[in-house]
């Protein structure tokens, strides 16, 4: 049996308790890429009415970014940008951005977080919405970057005939990006 902390209220924990917890946390964190990849696979089969399922869309978006010479972090963001679709349909971009935030740059975080409203440029008018809603962010230093992500990689990645890379091609990238937080209270600790 593994060791466990003995307290029932956090304020009563000891250094030994928190040492046990930190060991478990470290082990759990090392498995994060596996959990993320497993969750991405949940997107298989659900087309949401599109020509490809959400998994294929994610792979295709990342494939296009990779083939365009984008760096590894950007490609992983492209792969995971819609990962929240299954459990946060109304705010999937926020969920994906929150998951990625400790591990990626401010710019890539902003792109993922706002891609939903920027993607609307291509279809909102067909749903009775303002296709230019993204303009509320006009002037933001990452506006052009997010618009480019949607134009080059996201809005055009619903092609069932496209020659996609395989998930296995992206696994090492996911593992490297999620190896250690860059932007969190844990960034200077073993993770």
Image (spheres, rainbow, N blue to C red):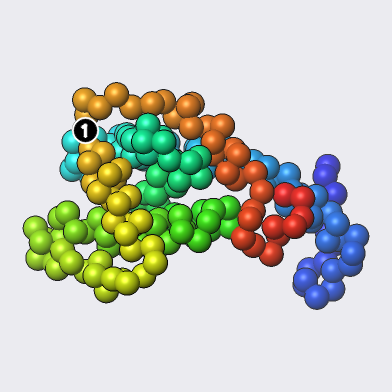
Q: What residue does disc 1 label?
A: 159
Query: Callout 1: few (<14), some (14-19), or many (20+) C-alpha neighbours within 10 Å?
Result: some
Figure label count? 1
Q: Nearer the viewer, residue 83 or 74?
A: 74
Q: Does the image show residue 82?
A: yes
Name which quarter of the figure residue 18 lies in: bottom right
Q: Position of residue 23 (x, y in %)?
A: 80, 50
Name which quarter of the figure residue 63 lies in: top left
Q: Nearer the viewer, residue 91 or 77?
A: 77
Q: Position of residue 105 (x, y in %)?
A: 53, 56
Q: Secondary structure at mark 1?
A: loop
- In the picture, which quadrant includes the N terminus? top right
Report the residue at 37% width, 49% height from top: 82
Report the residue at 22% width, 41% height from top: 156
Name which quarter of the figure residue 2 lies in: top right
Q: Position of residue 38 (x, y in %)?
A: 50, 37
Report the residue at 75% width, 57% height from top: 188
Q: Is residue 188 left or right of residue 177?
A: right
Q: Is residue 6 left or right of residue 165?
A: right
Q: Position of residue 161 (x, y in %)?
A: 21, 25
Report the residue at 57% width, 44% height from top: 177
Q: Does the image show residue 92?
A: no
**Vertical relation: 179 (above or below) 136:** above
Q: Nearer the viewer, residue 101 or 9?
A: 101
């Amino acid at each position: 049996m593994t060791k466990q902390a003995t307290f029932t209220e956090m304020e009563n924990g000891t250094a030994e308790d928190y040492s046990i917890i930190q060991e478990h946390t470290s082990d759990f964190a090392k498995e994060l890429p596996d959990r993320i990849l497993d969750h991405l696979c949940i997107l298989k089969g659900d087309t949401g009415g599109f020509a490809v399922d959400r998994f294929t869309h994610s792979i295709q978006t990342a494939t296009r970014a990779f083939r365009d010479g984008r760096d590894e972090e950007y490609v992983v963001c492209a792969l995971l940008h819609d990962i929240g679709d299954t459990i946060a349909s109304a705010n999937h971009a926020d969920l994906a951005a929150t998951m990625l935030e400790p591990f990626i740059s401010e710019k890539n975080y902003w792109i993922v977080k706002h891609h939903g409203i920027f993607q609307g440029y291509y279809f909102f008018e067909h749903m009775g919405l303002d296709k230019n809603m993204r303009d509320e962010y006009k002037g933001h230093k990452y506006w052009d970057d997010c618009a480019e992500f949607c134009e080059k990689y996201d809005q055009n990645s619903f092609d069932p005939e496209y020659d996609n890379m395989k998930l296995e091609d992206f696994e090492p990238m996911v593992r490297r990006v999620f190896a250690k937080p860059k932007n969190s209270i844990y960034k200077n600790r073993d993770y």
